Image (spheres, rainbow, N blue to C red):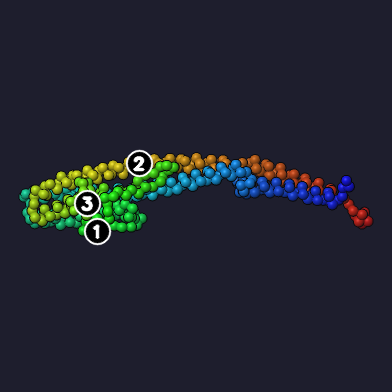
Amino acid sequence: MRVTNSMLVNNMITNLGRNLSRMEKYQEKLATGKKISVPSDDPVVAARALKLRTDVSQIEQYKKNVKDALSWLEITESAIADVGDILQRARELAVQGSNGATTPEDTQKIGEEVRQLKNQLINLGNATYAGRYIFSGFKTDTKLINDDGEFDIDVFNAEQIIYQIGVGDSININVTGGDLFNGGGVADSGTSGTLFEDIDNFITALDSGDYATIDATIGRIDIQQNNLLRIRADIGARCNRLELTENRLGNDGLNFTKLMSVNEDIDQAENIMLLKSEENVYRASLAGGARIIQPSLVDFLK
């Protein structure tokens, strides 16, 4: 077969293109810091990268859920602590009012303060977090209690707000109004909690001078306080669990990010060495190609 200059030139151009393509591949890795730019570069690395990226993304979402859950529970615990302070003050007033030596004027003043305590209880029952009513179950856009101390929603069907905080791991973050304000069972009226019923009976007894009912209020308030202690203990346990979960997710995030880096990131020193090697090959092919083009007759006539 006769070899022509055209064949030599075409082969030279083809080989130059291949060498340039290999050099460009290492230049792109150096610029991006990644082993692959498209899945076809290495399907195994690409598949593993997709899985690890999904895991890291899930962990980040779980971390956000944990922070939101902690904030919700902290607001809830703060509101319940304030309810506890109100009950303690109401108990002190009940002890004071149960003394038969108090005058009608004294009981009237106590009654006025208890009415203010009731109003504050209503405000706490309608406490919000990020614009959502925290004691209203799923109906976070609806107030729990109206101005008369009666429930605006059905609180007797427990509605738990569940947050996903891990793979197959979830937690209830809310306290329902029915649980909070029904420490002594179900109210006789059926439209308000036993806590508000006890407060209303307390006010009525103060207005009428019913010292026996005032004295009985002390025991009723004790029941409500015990209920609050139970709820606060449960909230504390959930907060502890969330804090442990937050620490675990932080460690998982670091571990999976490290695995993702090992899977995707290049060894810069090795890549630079290979790049220089391909660059030398390319330069050598350019020099060799220059020798392929032989001088023509015109060159000899000059």
CA gap between label 2 and label 3 equals 29 Å
Of the numbered discs in the image, which one, if any, rests on residue 146? 1
Residue in the foreground of this view, choosing between 186 and 132: 186
- Residue drawn 65% across the image and 40% down it: 270
Which mark lies nearer to you, 2 or 1?
Answer: 1
Quadrant of image for the C terminus: bottom right
| Extreme residue toward the right, this view | 301
Q: Residue 276 appears at what percent x and percent y?
A: 70, 44
Q: Which residue is mark 3?
A: 193
Find out whether the residues at labels 3 and 1 contact each other: C-beta distance under 8 Å: no
**Sequence order check: which comes first, mark 2 or mark 3?**
3
Residue in the foreground of this view, choosing between 264 and 31: 264
Q: Residue 109 appears at what percent x and percent y?
A: 12, 56
Of the numbered discs in the image, which one, if any, rests on residue 60? none
CA gap between label 3 and label 1 equals 12 Å
Q: Helix, strand or loop at disc 3?
A: loop
Q: Residue 253 appears at what percent x and percent y?
A: 48, 43
Q: Helix, strand or loop at disc 1?
A: loop
Is residue 14 visible in the rendered image? The answer is: yes
Q: Helix, strand or loop at disc 2?
A: helix
Is residue 123 visible in the rendered image? The answer is: no
Residue in the foreground of this view, choosing between 90 and 137: 137
Q: Looking at numbered disc 2 in the image, what kind of residue is underneath it?
A: Asn
Q: Which residue is mark 2?
A: 240
Q: Is residue 99 left or right of residue 196?
A: left
Q: Looking at numbered disc 3 in the image, what kind of residue is underneath it?
A: Gly
